Image (spheres, rainbow, N blue to C red):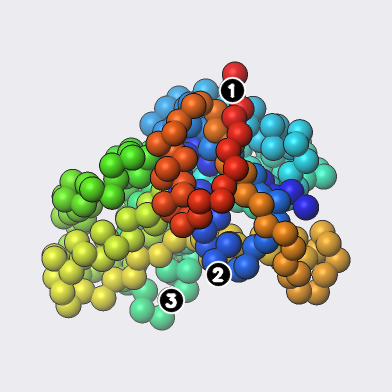
Amino acid sequence: MKIGFFDSGLGGLTVLKEALENEGLSEEIYYLADTKNTPYGIKDEEFVKKVIYDNIEYLIKIGCNPIVIACNTATSLCINEFRENYNDIVFIGTEPAVKVAADSNMSKKILVLATSITVRREKLLNLIDKLNIKDNVELLAADELVTFAENINCNNMKNEINNYIESILSQFNMSEFSHIVLGCTHFPIFRDNFYNVINKINPNLDIKVIDGARGISNNLKNYINKIKGNKKYVQGTKKITIVLTSKNNDFIVRTKQILANDKIEVDYKLQ
């Protein structure tokens, strides 16, 4: 079975990593990263939709089903249309883990960080309205974290990243919050940075930094079982191919760092 993962860049690797390490995903995996057009969050929405459709059609053409839209921006823009237009393909989307935070017994206020497109799209706003927590949620775009994540020198930029995160959190009284929801798949790369900054602000703060990767990987495994007719997931032969839309050796290096795996094949979808 061919499983497709799609993201504008590196962010979806946090979802794939969760599926591989904690869910034991073992399939023929194609991870398509639109390195030519990343980042999406600050670009024109119609342009972004066009390139997303082009990339998803590529994954369908090579036989991927299901397909994980491991990108909050792409999910908010396109997933409803994908499900309407491609009836025979299972699409698993990504959305900020707002419900997880809202359902928590310790829930106070929730800070949701995402890209500019995700923050202003109806999909996230409707979810917040549905949960009846509008007065308890703060939304903020943090697009610069995507740029940091894609940088080959990211691991050597701790001070710059921490300073940026501190500038975000300093806009709020963090003692009022119980959760920070990382609403872009790039952002969990910096989970430790968030906790370091929170500790710097006030070591006594009890704030959980969460994302939706675990829920996505659970959904993926359930869909695979359903497609295969299995009651529980049966591991097969694992193969990972990274497909890029531009020649980008830095991306390949970062991928191997994040997945801690050197046995990754690389292909290109060049226009």
Q: The residue tagged with tag 3: helix, strand or loop?
A: loop
Relative to 235, 73 lies left or right:
left
Of residue 264 and residue 226, the one placed in the foreground of this image is 264
Judging depth in this view, the residue of 212 and 151 nearest the camera is 151
Pointer 2: residues within 10 angstroms few (<14), some, or many (20+)? few
Query: What is the number of the mark on residue 270?
Result: 1
Up/down of 74 relative to 106, above or below: above
Image position of 224 (left or right of 32): right
Q: Residue 132: which numbered mark, if any?
A: none
Q: Earlier in the sequence, mark 1 or mark 2?
A: 2
Q: Is residue 213 visible?
A: yes
* Secondary structure under the numbered disc 1 in the rendered image: loop
The amino acid on which the numbered mark 2 sits, given as a three-letter code, is Asn
Q: In the structure shown, which secondary structural element does the residue marked by tag 2 occupy?
A: loop
Q: Residue at x 49, y 27 (%)?
A: 247
Residue 267's x, y, as percent? 61, 34
Image quadrant occupied by the C terminus: top right
Residue at which label 3 appears: 104
Rendering quarter of residue 215: bottom right
Residue at 83% x, 62% y is 228
Kind of residue indicated by mark 1: Leu
Q: Is residue 246 positioned above or below 19 on the image?
A: above
Residue 1, percent from left and from top: 78, 52
Q: Is residue 141 visible?
A: no
- Say which label, 3 or 1, has the lower sequence index: 3
* Label located before the other in sequence (3 or 2): 2
* Residue 175 percent coordinates (x, y): 20, 70
- Tell me the kind of residue under disc 3: Ser
Q: Which residue is mark 2?
A: 22
C-alpha distance separating marks 3 and 2: 22 Å
Q: Between marks 1 and 2, how big is the CA–CA gap?
A: 33 Å
Q: Which of the 4 image quarters holds residue 30?
A: top right
